[in-house]
Amino acid sequence: MTAARRRPLRRAAFRLLPLVLLAACAATLAQALQVRELRVTGTRRFPAADVERALRSALGTPTVAVRPEELRAAVRQIPWVADAQVRVTLDGVVACAVRERRPVAVAVDNGRRTLVDAEGELLAPAGPTAPALELVDYGAHPHERAGVLAAVPAFEAAWGARVVRVTRLASRDVTVEFEGVACPVAVDPATPAGLVAARAVLRAWLAERGGAPLRLDARVSGRVAVLPAPEPEPEPIAGEGA
């Protein structure tokens, strides 16, 4: 090859050299700027470790290759997460700000106690600081939880006390237990006004008999049925049967 032909090749090589060096620097920089830390904020009721597990796939990945929206979608799969915002910084930090769902009751099904929000969504196992309100036997009918939770304020307004337990009887029938009241009351959540009459009947019953009945039933409009407690067994008279 003549000197005249080699000169254009050298000039082309010199032109490509900066591009090659730039690509090499970019690759080196990408390897250096890998995700090395996860930071989670906004968790108060639930463990940040759940979010960290959802983000863990990003560790060791070059920051330029991390997709914040993919990480956000993974975090939002956690039942107690209402929403999340994810940022990735060039110094290798994935920062995730979480908005939690608020538990309002405990779902009790087959011995399991699970926190539930106002939309009826199961969140996480219930701990010692769980809400006092319990929803019992809704495991096979999860779509009904939100409706009965929405009816609780009407129950409390009609009776004048806080609801502590609602047990499913049928699709539109529940028994409601109130704080400080020994007797559960059956009612249709769509017509909570029957509780007003049921409370009046309970007061009259207690004034006349002293002990609470087993249950009141206010599911039929204008009527309250009473299931009396069984009479105590009479004590045997001394000397009988001797």
Image (tube, rainbow, N blue to C red):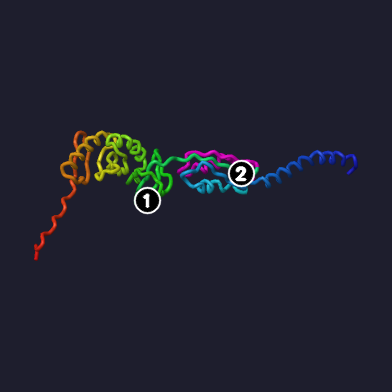
Rendered residue at 81%/41% (across/down): 13
**Residue 81 as seen in the image, left or right of residue 192:** right
**Residue 61 as seen in the image, left or right of residue 12:** left
Quarter of the image where the N terminus is located = top right
Query: Mark 1: which amino acid?
Result: Arg
Quarter of the image where the C terminus is located = bottom left
Query: Mark 2: which amino acid?
Result: Val
Q: Position of residue 164 (x, y in %)?
A: 32, 43
Rendered residue at 27%/34% (across/down): 158
Observer-nearest of 116 and 17 = 116
Instruction: Count residues near mark 1 (Cα–Cα under 10 Å), then give few for <14, some for 14-19, many for 20+.
Output: few
Query: What residue is pinned by disc 1?
Result: 112
Instruction: Count residues near mark 2 (Cα–Cα under 10 Å), then give few for <14, some for 14-19, many for 20+.
Output: some
Observer-nearest of 39 and 63 = 39
Q: Position of residue 171 (x, y in %)?
A: 29, 40
**Secondary element at image label 2:** strand
User: Which residue appears farthest toward the bottom when viewing the image?
Assistant: 242
Say which mark, if any, is on residue 93: 2
Rendered residue at 16%/44% (across/down): 209
Observer-nearest of 118 and 141 = 118
Q: Which residues are magenta?
A: 62-90
Q: Mark 1 or mark 2: which comes first in sequence?
A: 2
